[in-house]
Image (cartoon, rainbow, N blue to C red):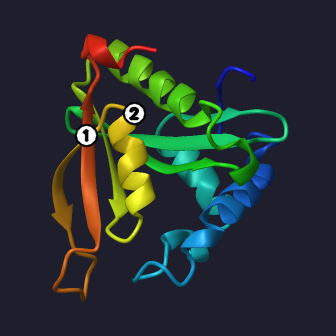
């Protein structure tokens, strides 16, 4: 498996990354409410995300990706995806470890991400990857929790590798 490489806003693989995201998020359709923001995003929107913060991709064609942005003392992970055929091979771990290395080098304290309440398998996967649930939030117009927030300290030696 390839190592993660930085994905720039003008990267030739951006269209393939969009396809990866659409395929990876497809099983959420009908499971989550409200629908993923990805349903409203195109390649140009991904280019904007890649310009706002570091993004990484694994594989050619891409089998995994993550977009990030700095939020206070944290590196927020968004649009983390692994192709269904590549799941269980350490792709997400490599991407998250790369993001943690970047956050550590930038003096940031933690990685954070959100996942939907309904995606229980994702919650378990993030816990296995060293994250802890630290809270919940509701999308605009919802009075009940729609997402859980997870965090992982970047200087926790138990999380390396």
- Tell me residue 160's x, y (percent): 39, 14
Q: Quadrant of the N terminus?
A: top right
Query: Can residue 41 be seen from the camera position used here?
Result: no
Query: Can residue 23 be seen from the camera position used here?
Result: yes
| Contact check, label 1 and label 2, Cβ < 8 Å | no
**Which mark's residue is nearer the viewer, 1 or 2?**
2
- Tell me residue 47's x, y (percent): 63, 51
Q: Earlier in the sequence, mark 1 or mark 2?
A: 2
- Tell me residue 53's x, y (percent): 47, 38
> Would you call the spot at circle 1 few (<14 residues within 10 Å), some (14-19), or many (20 or more)?
many
Q: Residue at x 29, y 37 (%)?
A: 131
Q: Residue at x 20, y 32 (%)?
A: 73
Q: Which mark is residue 151?
A: 1
Q: Secondary structure at mark 2?
A: loop
- Tell me residue 40's x, y (percent): 58, 76
Q: Residue at x 29, y 15 (%)?
A: 158
**What residue is pinned by disc 2?**
129
Q: Nearer the viewer, residue 143 or 140?
A: 143
Instruction: Tell me the distance, in whole angstroms, between the alpha carbons under discs 1 and 2.
Output: 10 Å
Q: Nearer the viewer, residue 84 or 70?
A: 84
């Amino acid at each position: 498996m390839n190592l993660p490489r930085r994905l720039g806003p003008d990267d030739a693989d951006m269209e393939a990354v969009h396809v990866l995201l659409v395929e990876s998020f497809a099983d959420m359709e009908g499971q989550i409410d409200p629908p993923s923001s990805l349903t409203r995003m195109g390649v140009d929107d991904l280019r904007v995300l890649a310009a706002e913060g570091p993004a990484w991709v694994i594989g050619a064609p891409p089998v995994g990706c993550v977009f990030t942005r700095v939020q206070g003392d944290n590196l927020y992970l968004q649009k983390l995806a692994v192709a269904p055929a590549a799941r269980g091979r350490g792709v997400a771990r490599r991407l998250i470890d790369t993001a943690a290395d970047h956050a550590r080098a930038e003096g940031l304290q933690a990685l954070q991400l959100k996942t939907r309440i309904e995606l229980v398998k994702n919650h378990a996967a993030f816990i296995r990857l060293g994250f802890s649930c630290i809270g919940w939030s509701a999308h605009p117009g919802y009075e009940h929790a729609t997402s859980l927030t997870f965090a992982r300290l970047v200087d926790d030696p138990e999380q390396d590798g």
